[in-house]
Amino acid sequence: MFGRAVGRLLRDRTGNVLMMAAASMPVLVGAAGLATDTVQWTLWKRQIQRQADSAALAGAYAVAQGFSASDSATSDINRMSLVTLTQTPTIENAPTTGSYAGNSKAVRVVLQTSAELPFSKILGVKAPVIYGEATAAVVGSGDYCVVSLEKTSAVGITLQGNATVNLGCGIATNSRASNAVYAGGSSTVTATPVAAVGGLTSSSNYVSPTTLLPYSIPVLDPYAGLPTPNVSGCSAKVSVNPQQSVVSPPLQPGCYKGFDIKGTLTMAPGVYYVDGGTFDVGSQAVINGTGVTIILTSSNAANNPSSIANVNINGGATLNLKAPTDLSDPYHGVLFYQDRRALDSGTNTINGNASSVLQGAFYFPGQAMSFSGTSGMTTDCVKMVGKRVTFIGNSNIVNQCKDTGVDKFTATLVKLVG
């Protein structure tokens, strides 16, 4: 009887599937668990790469502003803390490898993590070492001919009314406004790029191929190295009445207590200091000068900065003014330079008619300047640096400055390069 029961049991096949399922269960569970672990490792890879990218950018931004790349990158790593690192981060300011090797404007960051997970550990799968590597660098963002040094939330560059500005270069402002460059009304601007420390609002006022670079790093003052003016014992004010001409002999370089020009004036090459008052040019005036620099200052600037001279050139005036081209001249390429101690409350106005020819830089670091071009005005090489800059009318700057003595303005941006 017992033998027959054993025989029936041996011939019974109804439990085979259950036995096979039970035997394969550890493999199925392990495979599913390993897939779960792989998803976790993939997530860590994405997180550690994001952390490396952010740290490299933080380090490069620090380099751009003269701070420690290592300190900034380390602080950023600690702030994000997306994954637990198993090795001390590698932070190189001047990478030792890659296309930016040896570049002191580049920062390379390498992060590493590794951790066993339960399912892979059960199956004897060794935990992978996960790396995040990124390189960020300070690179050039273009050639600029208009720079606003405004650092507050005030608008840095404004295009008014129906102003048409066509530039063979870029414009940049250090303004932190949400819309740091304002192009209003029917104004149009063609410039590449348009950069700002603050925000920029895209609009139809920007004509192709204009590109916008909001939230850029600040532009350095290109003329910060010019000496602070120091004048005394200046001559009387230069006045030229309508129908009057001061041509031969021309006016000689020196220091004068203001200019009031309503007639024709020729200026000999050299530096002209304006001690207080205004460099005032009437609507019918004609001024000629090659190799000249006009410095607006005051003999009492240290005690009374409000006394620093400004400029007011009326529309209709004919200006034929060119800055010095000799690179050995400390003021080479500079046509107008206002003492940087000037109070922000002042405004400087530059206009001209279709017959005007201007070549050189207008430098008003402490005050606003307004430029009104006219169709036909020759401004092949004009640079503008002001606290704030406003365009009125038509301005067409080709930016052909070879052999003019005018320095090139370049700005930078920070981006991932590897």
Image: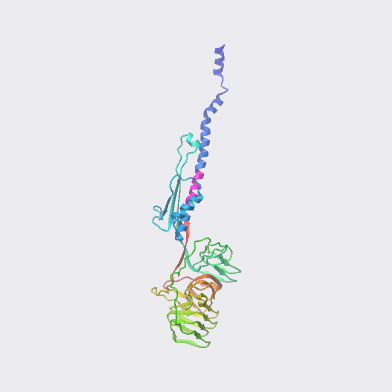
Task: Identify which residue, 2 or 350, lies in the foreground.
Answer: 350
Q: Is residue 51 magenta?
A: yes
User: Is residue 352 something that shows in the picture?
Assistant: no
Task: Identify which residue, 18 or 123, lies in the foreground.
Answer: 123
Coordinates of residue 186 in the picture (x, y in percent):
60, 69
> Which residue lies at the image location 51% right of the left edge and 35% below the top edge?
31
Eyeballing the image, is 411 above or below 121? below
Coordinates of residue 43 in the picture (x, y in percent):
51, 44
Q: Is residue 352 magenta?
A: no
Among all residues in the image, which is located at the extreme right? 185
Coordinates of residue 306 in the picture (x, y in percent):
52, 76
Would you say the magenta stretch is mainly helix, strand or loop? helix
Q: Which segment is the magenta one?
A: 42-53
Q: Quadrant of the N terminus?
A: top right
Coordinates of residue 238 in the picture (x, y in percent):
49, 84
User: Is residue 64 something that shows in the picture?
Assistant: yes
**14 sits to left or right of 253:** right
> Which residue lies at the image location 56% right of the left edge and 12% below the top edge?
2
Among all residues in the image, which is located at the extreme front? 303
